[in-house]
Amino acid sequence: MATVTFSAADDLLYAYLAGEIDHDAAQSLRMQLDDALVSRSPRTLIIDLGGVGFMDSSGIGLILGRQRCARVLGTSLRLQHAPAQLQKVLRLAGIPCTENIAKGECAMKAENSTRIQFDSLSSNEAYARGVTAAFLARYDPTVPQLADLKTAVSEAVTNCIVHAYPERIGPVCMTIAVYPDREVHITITDKGIGIPNVEQAMQPLFTTGNPEERSGLGFAVMQSFMDRVKVTSKPGKGTKVLLVKRLSRREPT
């Protein structure tokens, strides 16, 4: 027997599964999850597997089916807190789970990804934007979507050039990954001086640069154009910026 309990926060819907998920239990869970997806229309459905003691291939089918349903409805789907024994089953379906900065969050396996590294030179801002546009072209993003992504990438790279390496040239790494629900994850990492107070740095108009030349709106621009922005940093070690945006599908003509 398995149960599901729902809770909502902003545009997130959490589904907490508990018990044993076999063929019989999966049918009931399927109906409850689909009903919640349709009636509540969340931007993101997060399925918490922390209370699941057993799951066979019927559970995999349940998750994959809800992924397809969510995609049709324009909702992204994530997993979190999968016990170790469940992770083995999930990996068989190409759904790897890693204990990471997201506290055990599991991400669907990326359909496609690329990684580049370049020096923190102003001339490489255009290169980073160009790589972003070229890599995402096959997913046929709308012009506004691509403009948003290029703008956010440019802001993140500029931060590396101006703030991470203020007195030297250093390496900047950019990774682009696209997930099955057309969710784009772009990670930009440097090994610069780091940010002592990330929360303060993300406030609009805050800048450590010349106030006559820098607006202090870099992170604010990223946040306004992306669905999600996550910044982690350690002074003296560097900074990582995660940009997330889901690409909507073009209307058929």
Image: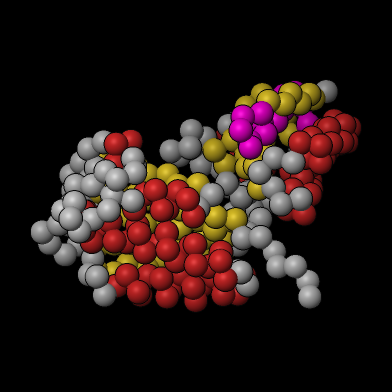
What residue is rendered at 48% in x and 33% in y? 103
Per the rendered image, the range of residues in magenta is 8-22
Left or right: residue 148 versus residue 115 is right
**Image coloring type:** secondary structure
Residue at the location (74% across, 41% down)? Answer: 41
Q: How many marks?
A: 0
Where does the image place residue 180, in percent across and percent down from the top left?
A: 65, 57
Magenta stretch: includes residue 241 = no
Q: Is residue 148 left or right of residue 237?
A: right
Q: Nearer the viewer, residue 237 or 8?
A: 8
* Position of 96 relative to 150 (above/below): above
Residue 237 versus residue 12 in the image, above or below: below
Look at the image and tell me in which quarter the N terminus lies: top right
- Can residue 64 be seen at all in this image of the molecule? no
Of all residues, the one furthest to the front in this rendering is: 212
Q: Residue at position x 79%, y 75% from top?
A: 253
Q: Residue at x 42, y 63 (%)?
A: 151
**Percent position (x, y) of residue 168?**
12, 62
Against 83, residue 231 (above or below) is below
**Residue 97's spot in the image, x, y percent?**
56, 43
- Provide residue 25's location: percent of width, then percent of height: 85, 30
Query: Which of the 4 image quarters holds residue 36?
Result: top right
